[in-house]
Amino acid sequence: MPRGTKIASAPLTTAQQLGSIVKSCRDIMRKDKGLNGDLDRLPMLTWLLFLKFLDDMETLRETESRMKGGKFIPAIEKPYRWRDWAAAEDGITGDPLIAFVNQDEAERPDGKRGMGLFKYLRSLQGDDGGDRRDTIATVFRGTVNRMINGYLLRDVINKVNGIHFTASEEIHTLARLYESMLKEMRDAAGDSGEFYTPRPLIRLIVSVIDPRLGETMEDPAAGTGGFLVEAFEHLAAQCKTKEDYGILQRKSILGGEAKSLPYLLCQMNLLLHGLEFPRIDPLNSLRFNLRELGERDRVDIIMTNPPFGGEEEKGIQRNFPEDKQTAETALLFLQLIMRKLRKQPKSGFPAARAAVVVPNGTLFGDGVCARIKEELLREFNLHTILRLPNGVFAPYTSIPTNVLFFDRSGPTREVWYYEHPLPQGRKNYTKTMPLQFEEFQPCLQWWGRRKGSDRAWKVKASEIAANNFNLDRKNPSTKEDITHLPPEQLAAGILEKEKKIIAIVGEIQALLRKKS
């Protein structure tokens, strides 16, 4: 081959192009001293993608509206649209760009003084009933631009301009890429693990709950929107007409997320997957008085992994019945979920149902916890408890976890337990060897044709009630597992071992004294 001859490279796929763009953005942002790791870089990239996505969608709808002879009212007006201040590569940059984005009042790209970008976006207000402007305002009330170098910010903006949200293939690919970015953020910082649930577990839960078009699904602790996205895609596959699509967009998906970072990530995640007007409550879902929640506040399906280990303030606790007030976040969410399930099913639909991830302590807890479980068994059908092995949520917690499946079909008569095993030869799931959806195939096959096995067993509700509503039932086919013992037994076992250690140390010291 002659010297200097260029070898033609294969054209990049959409995924490779988008991956390259996102990587370039993150490389540029690493140079900015105002950003601190992925916990700052990902939100930064998210709000830029959010505005680019919004402008592309509005451009598309404006064109469609004109072709039909209609009038289009944009959510964002000039000169705050992406195309006005970001689209031109040689556009506003440096300190003027930072000032325009951050300051309450600044010189705008049109040369006039007025509200800065974030100030304007936070001031947006929809018409009665709410619309996309309310979503934008809520997103940016919890968003801060941490980049301090306006030239680097312009470089990132120019890279984002290479993504075109008018192509369905790019939107779908970027949605998948975005999910991998969320996982990377989870891996980079343990404190974000509280709003991440492994996708394989979410897929299993959505598969067996089986949301149907016409039902309303909610996640009151939505995090980055994993359950909502999976439910949306499950329902989208059922849409056959324009009316079906309208029901999916307007009446199917609800959520709540009180923390600003996961709230922003959730909004973007849902938008990228095709939900045009995400209805995500940015405040604490536990702020409502349970006694005031009526049928109009209820939904058909709740799927969620509420935070556990947290503590709620007294003002929140007073929203719950006196004999069931507790600081434990997981127990408060469980009560909220029970109260929010629709009492009477819609015509032609199954009973309202829920799937809730809970720590092992919820199963064996007494006191307030036992009273909550008594209500659960007497007023709901707790038909299944999925027992998950160690490491499903690694490396963020080693606490054994379970999924409670219950519905409004009547009181509990018996509880089926299914113990999901670790892969053969494994002692734990890890960050590098996580849970895979394919491992749930035996559980999915068992779900519709239940019978006892070395992984599945059932316990009568009367037996559970007689044992102070302790739901922590050991698999009768396996050896005793100390991680599933009640805390008093664990403590007694630890103390016994400590006594033996002290006795051995005493014997060694006595031998040493004799020798000396």
Image (cartoon, rainbow, N blue to C red):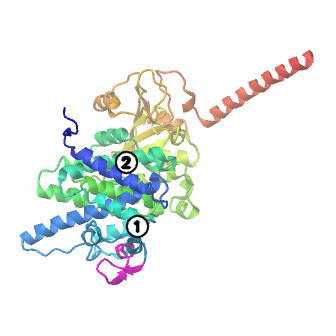
Q: Residues within 10 Å of mark 2 (few under 14, many from 20)?
A: some
Query: Where residue 491 sits in the image (x, y, percent)?
Result: 66, 34
Amino acid bearing label 2: Met
Mark 2, mark 1: which one is toward the viewer?
1
Query: Where residue 303 sits in the image (x, y, percent)?
Result: 36, 48
| Residue 494, picture quadrant | top right
* Residue 180 in sight: yes
Q: Is residue 262 magenta?
A: no
- Element at label 1: helix
Which residue is at 40% across, 58% downward?
Answer: 43
- Element at label 2: helix
On the rendered image, what quadrant is the N terminus found in? top left
Query: Where residue 436 sits in the image (x, y, percent)?
Result: 36, 33
Q: Relative to the observer, which residue lies in front, 205 or 378?
A: 205
Which residue is at 32% across, 30% downward?
Answer: 438
Region rendered in magenta: 104-121
The image shows a total of numbered marks equal to: 2
Query: Where residue 487 sits in the image (x, y, percent)?
Result: 61, 36
Residue that label 1 marks: 150
In the figure, is residue 313 to the left or right of 335? right
Q: Which of the marked residues, 2 or 1, is nearer the chain's N terminus?
A: 1
Residue that label 2 marks: 181
| Relative to 438, residue 356 above or below | below
- Cα distance in 3D space between marks 2 and 1: 24 Å
| Relative to 82, residue 213 above or below | above
In the figure, is residue 461 to the left or right of 108? right
